Image (cartoon, rainbow, N blue to C red):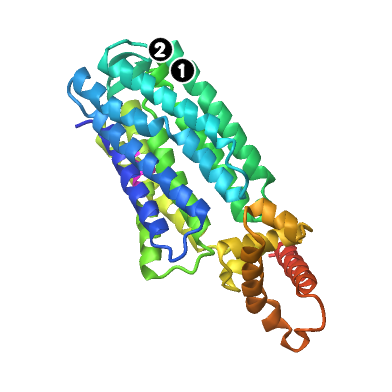
Amino acid sequence: MQFAFYIPVAAVFSGIGVLAHLLSLKRREPWQSSLVLLYGSLLASNLCIAIMISRQTAEEAEFVLFLLRHFFFSLPGLFLNFALNFASVSRRWLWPALVCTIALITVADLDYFFQLRWLLDRMERHSWGFFPRGTSLAIGALAILATYCISLAFWTLLRSRRIADNSVRSIVFLFVLWWIGIVLSMLPFAGVDIFPPGPAMDAAISAVIGALLSRNQKGGRISRALAGFSGLFASVALGTLAGWIVLVLSSGQMLPVLIAVSITSLAALTGWNRISRKSSDFRPVFVVLQSDYDLTYQEARICELVLEGMGRPRIETALGIGGGTLRNHLTSIYGKTIDIEEPESELSRDKLQRLTVFLSRLEQTGREEGSAPE
């Protein structure tokens, strides 16, 4: 079996660790649920890549490709769905991506069953295994879908109030690297004889993103163990990629390969542990309200809109809820925040005004902590 086979295998185990870690969270927000879908599709893609490059014939590899493209073509749309949920904005921009994804998968299925060769030129055998060679139509269609989803997703993430959080900025940067890895993985699809580095980058970046997203969560022992499991296999994936590169450069000598695998894996694991253990310098109000005041996702979102200066009618419109539902949420928010902070002045001022003052003070405190020297 080819040495490179173990790179996507390690990425699969890293993805399992991150996915299980997310599923173990006691309270999953909508954006975390969309992240579960994204990781699930990524895990399935890496599993199919591992099986595809290990097949003995082009026919067997092409059948695995038939399964792979259902997951791979879905990645841009799922990433856009995550970004929209993360920023709590309208999902109307997701519909064009869904239509294009379904159309592309349908054409790909017809291409496979009737051997039309619209998207797939042939399965090429490389030194590290089989990989598809795409047509100009396939490359162009994927480029259009990916450009639309990725550009809109990053624009949405950068406009989110959460971008003030250092962890969120790191996540956006890591997603940029993640997509660079996916683009590089498409080089053999365009005819370049290079092993796709995407699975190794998927493993490493996904593990780091999981650590960044979860380090402000109140996770238990099992949750921390699952995150560590992911970091371990991400390190193995990077070490295996480094070993494969050295194997090619050293003409098959195994001692340099073992040294490269060991050093790279240990360095990656050490770096991941430092990232996962470091606490955030600044937690935005949205995070503080959920972690310290036990507000739900919707309640914290209402507080964000209150901070933006919105009144009750605009909040109802923005969240698509009725007046009675908003009153119930506000009553719960008051009980968890201002009624605890200022119990003696419960009737002295309008509660919504008091909540605005409380939130402004909380936001200012977070900014001062974030700008404080180390």
Q: Which amino acid does label 2 sit on?
A: Thr
The percent position of residue 115, horizontal first and vertical second, equals 27, 12
Residue at the (82%, 83%) spot, across then down: 348
Q: Name the residue tied to disc 1.
A: 139
Question: Residue at the right extreme?
Answer: 349
Residue under the image location 58 percent in, 44 percent down: 84
* Magenta span includes 328: no
For the residues bearing labels 1 and 2, Cβ distance under 8 angstroms: yes
Q: Where's residue 264, x and y in %?
A: 40, 45
Query: What is the crowding at mark 2: few (fewer than 14 residues within 10 Å), some, or many (at least 20)?
Result: some
How far, Cα to Cα, is label 1 from label 2?
6 Å
Q: Identity of the amino acid at label 1? A: Ile
Which residues, given as a range, are shown in magenta? 236-240
Question: Residue 135 got which mark?
Answer: 2
Residue 239 included in the magenta stretch of the image = yes
Kindly identify which numbered label has been placed on residue 43.
none
Q: Which residue is drawn at 39% across and 28% down?
A: 196
Give 343 or 160, whichever is nearer the viewer.
343
Name the element at disc 2.
loop
